């Protein structure tokens, strides 16, 4: 299992929030829609790329590291039992084979339960971070839109986004990241302030290795 995290935006109603910001920008300049600018922002990328987002990712990784290791350990135990039942089936006594089969089934149920709990807790923690950063980012975007004459800004990362193509000339993602970091700087020496070895990635779900019937 990959031990890196990415903050997801599924919990944030980004389209609605961005729409509100765009509408506020539009209503402040009546009759300017024909000459106003249209922009696109990748909210998912922006949240992850901010210094605060990187810091939160590092903190979540540390927070859930022990539970990830526990899941990996359980999965390995199940895989080992599966291999023993498969490769050494003809060398096991009926009692030993039945014992391993029961042990594998117990561990598989335990792994599934712990994995479900883990995923729920990770999703909740990520949603809190996304909501915290996302709401502040909307304020940054609203101010940016007003100051630069945008009448609407679309979120290209939103589910069912209407954006099929975006030109780099109307992509304001990097501007929003830069302005967010200026508005909400993190303390020096924090995880995000130190160079990162690699871009975080979403940890894949652990798939239980169910022992075969003996």
Image (cartoon, rainbow, N blue to C red):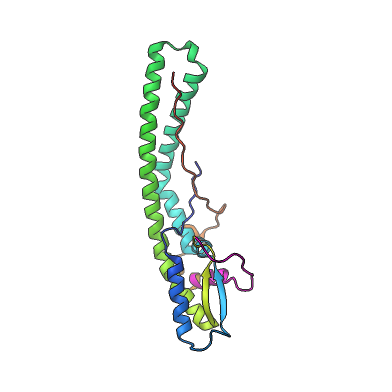
The residue lying toward the viewer, choosing from 85 and 22, is 22
Figure check: 146 above or below 95: below
Is 171 a magenta residue? Answer: yes
Q: Residue at x 55, y 69 (%)?
A: 173
Residue 107, given in percent of the width and then of the height, sits at 38, 30
Residues in magenta, as a range: 160-180
Figure check: 30 above or below 198: below
Quarter of the view holding residue 117: top left
Q: Residue at x 47, y 81 (%)?
A: 25
Q: Residue at x 43, y 49 (%)?
A: 62
Figure check: 154 above or below 193: below
Is 164 a magenta residue? Answer: yes
Residue 120, given in percent of the width and then of the height, sits at 37, 48
Quarter of the view holding residue 129: bottom left
Residue 162, given in percent of the width and then of the height, sits at 54, 66
The answer to whether residue 186 of the structure is visible from this angle is: no
- Magenta: main secondary structure equals loop
How many numbered circles are shown? 0
Q: Residue at x 46, y 59 (%)?
A: 9
């Amino acid at each position: 299992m990959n031990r890196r995290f990415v903050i997801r935006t599924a919990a944030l109603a980004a389209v609605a929030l961005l729409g509100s910001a765009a509408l506020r920008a539009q209503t402040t300049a009546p009759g300017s829609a024909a000459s106003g600018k249209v922009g696109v922002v990748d909210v998912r990328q922006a949240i992850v790329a901010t210094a605060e987002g990187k810091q939160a990712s590092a903190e979540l990784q540390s927070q859930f590291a022990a539970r990830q290791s526990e899941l990996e350990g359980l999965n390995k135990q199940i895989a080992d039992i599966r291999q023993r039942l498969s490769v050494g089936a003809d060398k096991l006594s009926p009692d030993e084979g039945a014992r391993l089969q029961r042990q594998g089934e117990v561990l598989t149920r335990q792994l599934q339960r712990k994995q479900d709990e883990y995923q729920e807790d990770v999703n909740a923690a990520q949603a809190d971070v996304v909501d915290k950063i996302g709401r502040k980012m909307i304020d940054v975007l609203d101010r940016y839109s007003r100051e630069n004459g945008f009448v609407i800004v679309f979120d290209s990362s939103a589910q069912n986004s209407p954006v099929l193509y975006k030109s780099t000339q109307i992509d304001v993602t990097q501007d929003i990241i830069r302005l967010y970091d200026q508005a909400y700087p993190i303390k020096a020496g924090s995880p995000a302030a130190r160079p990162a070895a690699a871009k975080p990635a979403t940890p894949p779900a652990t798939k239980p290795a169910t022992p075969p019937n003996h």
